Amino acid sequence: RSSNMILVAARQQARHLVASGRPALAAASSNIICNASRVVDDSSNSNSPISGSRTFGSDDTQQPPFDTVLVANRGEIACRVIRTCRRLGIRTVAVYSDADGPDSLHASMADTAHKIGIGPSPAESYLRADEILDVALTSGAQAIHPGYGFLSENSSFAAAVSDSDISFIGPSASAILAMGSKSHSKAIMEAADVPCTPGYHEHDQDVERLLHEAVDNVGFPLLIKATMGGGGKGMRIVWSE
């Protein structure tokens, strides 16, 4: 029911875009609606693999892709990954810092847990990519799930994991690198004819050039954002010349 409500809202938004003279955005919205409709139709089919929770049996075609997964995170996100792996019959390896300890919930939920780092802070523990990779290799983990935050958007870590013949559960290193740069990701979208908000993201960052682009091409108000920024940090609104 909730999926159908989302589709109704999306169709209303598409009609609004057409009425307001933005057919390109309406077309993009329509493509999203079509894809979402297929998902809703598939999920209503009891034989669909996306219907309900997925389980694996003794059949070779139903075996989980990994025997053991290392969860390179802590707290609630690690617990969620561990619970899902347990439901799928996959062993889990947890890592913990001095601050969390072996009795933390995520460490106690996993099949095995290993201490990492030399101190309580994330920089001394959960961001130690080399130690996490060593634990994965020694524990026999076939894949690493980074959760979110920490190393989940670190392209160097994703590449190092793949180079060690361990699967990285997440985007490829090249995708992380491309999406990390706002200017690069926007260039990719524009090359694919995806409608984008007008802006300037070229290499020439001279003040005079930026003022020219703002006044003559972009318009006000506008938003200044660091190309490698994240979490909304460093954004500034400019209301006028």
Image (tube, rainbow, N blue to C red):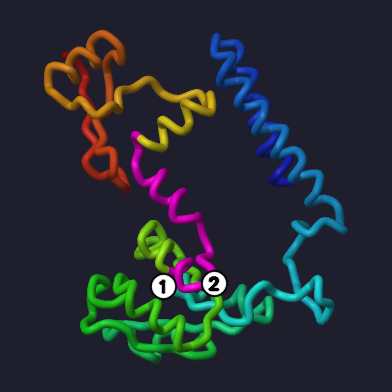
User: Alpha-carbon neighbours of circle 2 within 10 Å: few (<14), some, or many (≥20)?
Assistant: many
Residue 79 counted in the magenta span: no
Cα–Cα span, label 2 and label 1: 10 Å
Is 89 on the left-hand or right-hand side of 207? right
Question: 57 or 39, which is in the foreground?
Answer: 57
| Segment tinted magenta in the rendering | 161-183
Q: Where does residue 149 sit, x and y in percent of width and height?
A: 37, 61
Where 131 falls versus 35 (above or below)? below
Residue 100 figure quarter: bottom left
Quadrant containing the C terminus in the rendered view: top left
User: Alpha-carbon neighbours of circle 1 within 10 Å: few (<14), some, or many (≥20)?
Assistant: many
Q: Is residue 132 visible?
A: yes
Q: Where does residue 156 sit, x and y in percent of width and height?
A: 36, 61
Residue 169 counted in the magenta span: yes
Give residue 81's mark.
2
Under mark 1, the amino acid is Asn
Q: Where does residue 98 sit, x and y in percent of width and height?
A: 27, 86
Residue linked to disc 1: 73
Where 103 falls versus 38 (above or below)? below
